Image: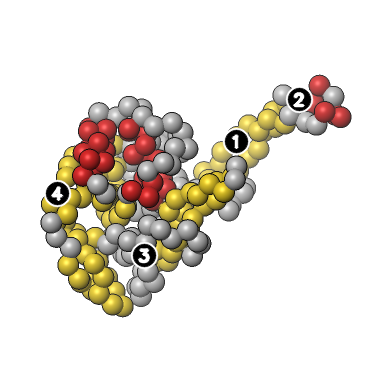
Amino acid sequence: MEQVLTFGLTCPFWASFRNHSTVNVHVTYPFPPPSTIYGLLNAARGKPQDWHDDRDAWQIALVVEQRGRLVETFSKIMKISRGDEGEGAAAKGVFDRTTLIRQKLLAPHYRVYLKGPLALLQEGERALLNPHWALYLGESDDLVDVQKPHIVGVAPQADTQAHSIIPAIVAGCQLVSVTVKFRQIGRRWTPVRRIYSLPPVGQEVTLPQPMSMYRIEGRKVVFDERTEDTGQT
């Protein structure tokens, strides 16, 4: 029997999970990447920004309960131009206004599953019930409602049907390459990406081969067991 921390995430307004390879049109992923879920958990625990010390201790699975309606909005952002030393002081501190298109998901709903050492799961449960910081999902103004975090005991078993996002290529699903975590190389943080299959909402899909599955509250959930993978998929 293993322990899993599970909770719901509902965005009362909207959410956006930007694909960072996009520039003037901010395209959103159809679900929050594992790195975003880990950031939410760290905010609840009161960890500093960009803290990743125990990322490899957590395994993250997700079921999309409601994808949300995709809309596109125009946004204006301010960029500061500091200038080079040769340009003189007048060029420093000048703000440029940039217009861009940003995709948003209206009122999406997710179910999150976390696996790891029991002490960490208990810490996460306490933090989500009484978060240190205000919680958001995606951008800093995308508020999120965390619903009923609790720990359940479950025994994994092999199965060929799943409801959650799947770390494999599965027929009948949308393929999405997302960031699962960041790895520091020198002074730079490099994203570790992986391809997931996203099943149709409310449906289970057939896997090409049996995988270790967790049956939790009516859902069959797959965790990504490859926590030591440091390359890009």
Q: Is residue 140 left or right of residue 11?
A: right
Q: Amino acid at mark 2?
A: Lys
What x and y, as percent, mark residue 119? 22, 40
Classify mark 4: helix, strand or loop.
strand
Q: Amino acid at mark 3?
A: Pro
Q: Residue at x 25, y 36 (%)?
A: 123
Mark 1 or mark 2: which comes first in sequence?
1
Determine which residue is flagged by label 3: 167
Determine which residue is flagged by label 1: 76
Pointer 3 local density, CA inside 10 Å: few below 14, some 14–19, many at least 20: many
Q: Is residue 140 left or right of residue 171?
A: right
In-front residue for pair 193/109: 193
Label 1 vs label 4: CA separation?
Answer: 44 Å
Q: Quadrant of the N terminus?
A: bottom left
Determine which residue is flagged by label 4: 152
What x and y, as percent, mark residue 105? 41, 48
Determine which residue is flagged by label 2: 92
Label 1 vs label 2: CA separation?
Answer: 21 Å
In-front residue for pair 230/72: 230
Q: Nearer the viewer, mark 1 or mark 2?
A: 2
Mark 4 or mark 2: which comes first in sequence?
2
